[in-house]
Amino acid sequence: MGTFFSATQVLDHLYLGSLEDAEELSRANPLAITTVISLCHEPVGRRAPGVCYLQFPVRDARPISIAWLNAILCALEESLPLGAVLIHCGAGMSRAPTVVAAYLDRIGFLGFARALSYLEDLRPVVAPAKALVESIERELTN
């Protein structure tokens, strides 16, 4: 918000972005990001000192298991009290927005489907993979 980042502020201290946004932190960290949660298979190449990097590889067009989703959501929940969090995937279009929507559902901010619409409004490039969305919807209703 008002920075050179293309990361999108979702909530206070929660940002959604791309691998490029995560690597930009090595040059400047105007949002005071303290934790980066990566959903990419490739690690963040350029890292900022003092930032905690967590990696949870998620396949984009594949279902996600409830155990893996819960591990990511727990890491997010544990990181937010420590400061601003950037959660990202390759382009910030599918994996990260889908997981953030699951988080918004979990905290009762918005139901999963409404959370995806909210994120699409905030970040027009959001285009979640159908298999990923369906697997999370299934897990959230069980």
Image (cartoon, grey):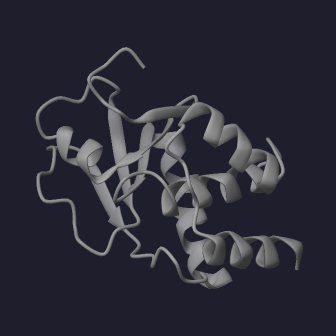
Q: Residue 118: percent from the left, percent from the top?
A: 70, 38
Q: Nearer the viewer, residue 103 or 101?
A: 101
Name the residue located 24 percent from the left edge and 30 percent from the top edge.
29
Name the residue located 20 percent from the left edge and 43 percent from the top edge.
50
In this rendering, would 50 be left or right of 86?
Answer: left
Quadrant placement of the N terminus: top left
Name the residue located 58 percent from the left edge and 68 percent from the top edge.
129
Q: Residue 67: percent from the left, percent from the top?
A: 62, 83
In this rendering, would 11 be left or right of 108?
Answer: left
> Toward which corner of the image does residue 84 lie, by quadrant?
top left
Going by the picture, which residue comes out furthest to the right? 141
Q: Nearer the viewer, residue 127 or 78?
A: 127
Q: Residue 142: percent from the left, percent from the top?
A: 88, 80
**Number of labelled discs?**
0
Q: Nearer the viewer, residue 43 or 121?
A: 121
In this rendering, would 91 be left or right of 98?
Answer: left
Figure check: 41 above or below 39: below
Name the residue located 34 percent from the left edge and 59 percent from the top edge.
90
Q: Residue 99: percent from the left, percent from the top?
A: 59, 60
In this rendering, would 94 be left or right of 3?
Answer: right
Figure check: 129 above or below 5: below
